[in-house]
Image: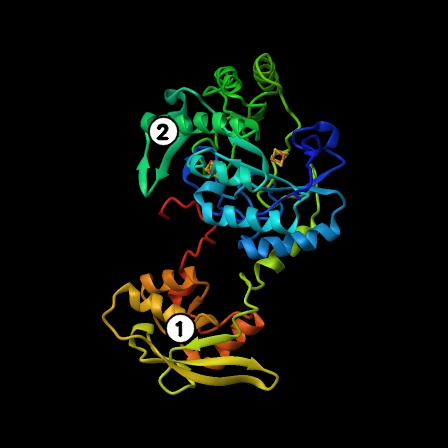
Amino acid sequence: MATKINIEEHPCFNIAMMHVNARVHLPVAPKCNIQCNYCNRKYDCINESRPGVTSSILTPYQAVKYLSALNDQIDNLKVVGIAGPGDPFANPNETIETIRQVHDAFPDKIFCLSTNGLEIEPYIDEIANLGVTHVTITINAVDPKIGSKIYKWMRINKHVYRGEEGARILMNQQLAAVSKLHAKRIIVKINSIIVPGINDEHIQEVAIKCKELGADVINCIPMLPTADTPFGTLEEPSKAMVFKTRLLASEHIPLVSHCVRCRADAAGLLGHDLKESYALLREFASRPDRDVSDRPYVAVATNEGLLVNLHLGEADSLYIFKQSSKGYKFVEQRRTPTVGLGDQRWIDLASILNDCQAVLVSGVGDNPRVIFENCGIHVIQMTGLIDEGLEGIYEHRPIRSISKQEVMGCHGKCSGNREGCA
Ligand code: SF4
Ligand code: SF4
């Protein structure tokens, strides 16, 4: 039976819990589907403390292992959240899988999400069923004219929308999400970033509209001018502006005002993050990214069994290796399916390799790479000694002769500004 969760324990929603209950953000969502004019996620400095910054990205599997380790180190770790560094629903598979695994392993934790609200709607039933009790949506405008000054673009299904059209799409999805989350009895917090001269006089309208749709609280956050962004040279909102904006919003909806603008990998009490958590996070990010206990083997595309020197498409057979107490041991050769079956060839091959955690190849096309990765087989492009590749996989060491494409490939771990990433 599911453990009953007391929502009053959330330190971001209840100021009395701020110095009592800790929270952790699991950084599993690197991509974003919109570009806010105040956001820059290029930095991963551990001294930089603001949303969008993280020292590493985790896979769902790594995130749960990291959470287990943190849970032993932090007293009263009550809340587990996903807050980027991009947006949870620009990375829906990673987000849902993380929630699922956390829910299974830690049913007594409060689970919350922080999102811009774009593309959350199809997942609301699922997150409610998985026990998410709190969602924060950042809504900066309920007027597309104002929204168009705050957002550079929105991307849905690889289509980019700009200007008032984009701001209207975002606004409509955000407001529909507030209603639906409320209907699912999920606590909804609205974050509104106060941008001087752009929306400071408009946030009251955001408060009215969101309250009408069922939002529970609002959090009016002064914008932090960030270097290399369109709003980087704006003045930070004055204390008087922040006070007035909050006062006007609070006439319509309860206000929370103790938000400390946390990093996407924050861990600990609000305002008192556990600094050691950054090293721990990096350590877990370098550990296996999936459960490989039932996949003892590694497949290799090789001519002679010494070097990785075949493109996957050229290999009539793959050599299978395993780790043993005496080093790496050749197990057998497995034939690859006939050329000419299109993607079915790669699906069949993934099935033949379903006990392999990785495949070493000198080259691979995009389709087989994606099919293999989706089947849980990590594809590594390299040239050089097979032993070096096997050591990299089994000992979690960097592979020196890894190919350039592999190093430069995105794999969702880019810390750039994602503008060129579709
Ligand atoms: Fe940055 Fe969040 Fe805006 Fe995305 S939604 S651009 S991560 S502030
Ligand atoms: Fe809580 Fe604000 Fe930090 Fe989010 S950013 S965890 S709302 S204090």
Q: Quadrant of residue 132?
A: top right
- Residue 178 x/y as whole percent: 49, 27
Q: CA distance from mark 2 to mark 1?
A: 45 Å
User: Is residue 69 in sight in this rendering?
Assistant: yes
Three-letter amino acid code at disc 1?
Answer: Ile
* Viewer-nearest of discs 2 and 1: 1
Number of marks in the rendered image:
2
Kindly give the residue lying farthest to the front in the view shown.
1
Graded by Cα atoms within 10 Å as few (under 14), some (14 to 19) or many (20 or more), the crowding at tag 1 reads some
Q: Is residue 151 above or below residue 402?
A: above
Is 241 in front, or is 218?
218
Q: Is residue 73 left or right of residue 405?
A: right
Q: Say left or right for 291 vs 37.
A: right
Q: Which residue bears the numbered disc 1?
A: 352
The residue lying at 47 percent from left, 20 percent from top is 199
Task: Answer whether residue 364 is visible to the viewer in this image.
Answer: no
Question: For the residue carrying disc 2, how many other residues have a C-alpha within 10 Å: few (<14), some (14-19), or many (20+)?
Answer: some
The residue drawn where x is 61% and y is 47% is 103
In the displayed structure, 91 sits above or below 321; it is above
Q: Nearer the viewer, residue 345 or 46?
A: 345
Q: Quadrant of residue 318?
A: bottom left
SS at circle 1: helix
**Residue type indicated by callout 2:** Ile
Circle 2 SS class: helix
Q: Position of residue 161 (x, y in %)?
A: 32, 34
Instruction: Provide the residue designation for mark 2.
Output: 169
Query: Front-most of 95 and 308?
Result: 95
